[in-house]
Each structure stands twice: as C-alpha cells, then as structure tokens.
Amino acid sequence: MKKFLVGLTAAALVGCMAAAPVMADDALLPGGDSKILYCITPSTSNPFFGTEQVIAEKIGTELGYEVKCFSHDDDAAAQLELFEAAITDKAAAIICDNAGADASIEAIQKAYDAGIPTFLIDREINQTGLAVSQIVADNAQGAAAIAEVWVEAMNYEGKYAELLGLESDTNCHVRSDNYHAVIDEYPDLEMVAQQSANWDQTEAYEKTEAILQANPEITGIICGNDTMACGAVQACIDAGRDDIKIIGLDGSDDAGNYIKSGDMVGTALQQIALITETAVREADAYLNGTAPEEEKQLIPCIAITADNVANLSQFVYSEESGAAVESVEEAAVESVEEAA
C-alpha cells in the first residue's frame, strides 16, 4: 500500500511511527499469552470500518498473528463484552475504533489492568495513558481543507444546513468546529439548520428530506462524514435539487462516485488503510519491545474533488491519476491464502 502514498503522507508516516528502543526499567504491558490480535470496530456496513478490519487481518496475518474481527455497533456495553472476550482469549493486543470518547474508557482500562495493550484508530478517547497509541486522521486539517473547497463552490454566499455525526464522538465536534472555522469567515453564508444524523446514511436521507421541506432556500449541505453525505446527496437527487453543494469527510468510493457524477463537491480522505496498518505494525513492534514515541499521532487528510477523484480507490490515494489500486479485500484474501 505504501507505493500509493503521496509524499506528505509518507513523511507523516515516518514521523508517526518513529520509535525508541525500550529500556530495561520501562514497564510495557506484556500482552496475553497468545499470537491473537483482536480488531474491534463499529459496524462494517460502513465500508470505512470494513476497511479497518480487512487491513488489520491482512497486516496482522502477514506478521504471524491470528486476527479476530468484531463489531461493537457503537454500543459501549457490547464493546466492553468484546474486550472481556479478548482478555479471556489472552489476546496479545487489541486494535480498536472505539464506541465513545468517554464510554470506552472502562473497557480499555480493563484491558490495561489485564496487561493487554490497546491501539486506538480513527477515534480518540478523553484520557491518555491507557492506550499505547491513538492514531487518527487529522480531522481538523481535513475539515478545513474541504470547507475551503465548499465555500468557493458556494460562491461565498447562500443558506446551508449541517448534518452532524454521533455527538458522543470527538470527531463529530472536531470536524464541525473546523468546518465553521472556515465558513464563518464569510458573513454571506448562513446556516439555517443543524441536525445530527449519527453517521448514518438512512437517517441522513430522512433528515435531508425534512430540511429541504422546511428550508427550500438552502443551496448547500455540509456533512460530518461521507455516509451521511451520500444520504443527503440521494435525498437531493430524489427531490430534483441538483443545485445543492454537498461535502463529506472520509474518502469513500461511494462519495467518489458522486463527485465524479457532479452530485457532490468533495470529501476529505481519511487514510484509514494507512492508519490501521500503522496501528498493527506498532502493536507488533510494542510486543517485541519497542514502543511508539508518542501516544497521540495524526495522519494528514487529502482533499478530494473532481480534479483528483480518479486517484482515489478503497481509501487509498494514488499518485498517478487513474492508476489501478488493488482491492483491499483481494489483498486480504491473498494474504490469508499465503499464510495457509
């Protein structure tokens, strides 16, 4: 996957994965007495989270682990049960896209107390020192970058709506705050509706339908992720509103297809394949005695528009326009077959 990274991303990866040998008096969590990695994510009905599990299995298998993948469906109680299962299973480490910045602390604390290291991806928690690393996309940078594209597409004026994500997720607020850090600089842009669609496409479709009925004058919608953006786009298409400028944030192929058709202005690619690979490799290094220098690590986002959407596939950005990017699903299958 590395050959597809832009120079900025490659530089960021080097910085994020910088590590120092562990001294004898450093207390590292030993991990369970196994070669099992748990990968716990939200529902894989969202391809973003599906990519996390595929990449974790691919890289983990390459490194000699048995990888067990599960979904918590953004339910903190279900997540706690999965962490307890990992502890019972004597997992070596846990890779987790968590179910809430506060609600997840209990589960990660249990793993910590059991000596099993946790490596967080995509979403942070509101505590440091429990997870070995928290590796996330630079949501602030990504949201600001695509907001700049959107205000230009709006010609710096007009009324708009915002669809927020899951409000217990810190990413929801970081993205919204940084959208507004750009948009609010333009007094002729006025937000007339703001609702949460909880990262969900169906809910976003329904909320957009209601917003269009109540606010027919809007000409733009900003969305906290691509799943909601795709729901908003389809609602606008079904309502015959091809004039509405819509952005999201994730970098999904579904959003890419809407950008290609002209129904969506753009998105900001969170390089989740790279983020997940980084976490799995850091887990392996940690279990072999080398800890990351920093717990909190940022991977830059890439603004995706009609100008460069041909470079996007499976949450990977290729330097060469239109270059064929190997499917991560195919890569995972090949990896498992080779291991067998």
Image (cartoon, rainbow, N blue to C red):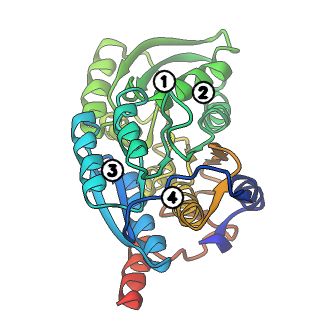
Marks 2/1 in contact by CB < 8 Å: the verdict is: yes
Q: Earlier in the sequence, mark 3 or mark 1?
A: 3
Give the quadrant of residue 275. bottom right
- Image point (37%, 82%), residue name: 336
Q: Which residue is mark 4?
A: 276
Inter-mark Cα distance, 1 to 4 = 36 Å
* Of residues 248 and 13, the one drawn nearer to the viewer in this rendering: 13
> Tag on residue 219?
1
Q: Quadrant of the C terminus?
A: bottom left
> Tag on residue 154?
2
- Left or right: 295 as drawn, with respect to 46: right
Q: Is residue 222 visible?
A: no
> Percent from the top left, x then y, of residue 58?
44, 73
Which secondary structure lies at badge 2? loop
> Percent from the top left, x then y, of residue 159?
51, 15
Inter-mark Cα distance, 4 to 3 = 16 Å
* Of residues 323 and 51, the one drawn nearer to the viewer in this rendering: 51
Q: Residues within 10 Å of mark 4 (few under 14, many from 20)?
A: many
Q: Amino acid at mark 4?
A: Thr
Which secondary structure lies at badge 3? loop
> Tag on residue 46?
3
> Tag on residue 193?
none
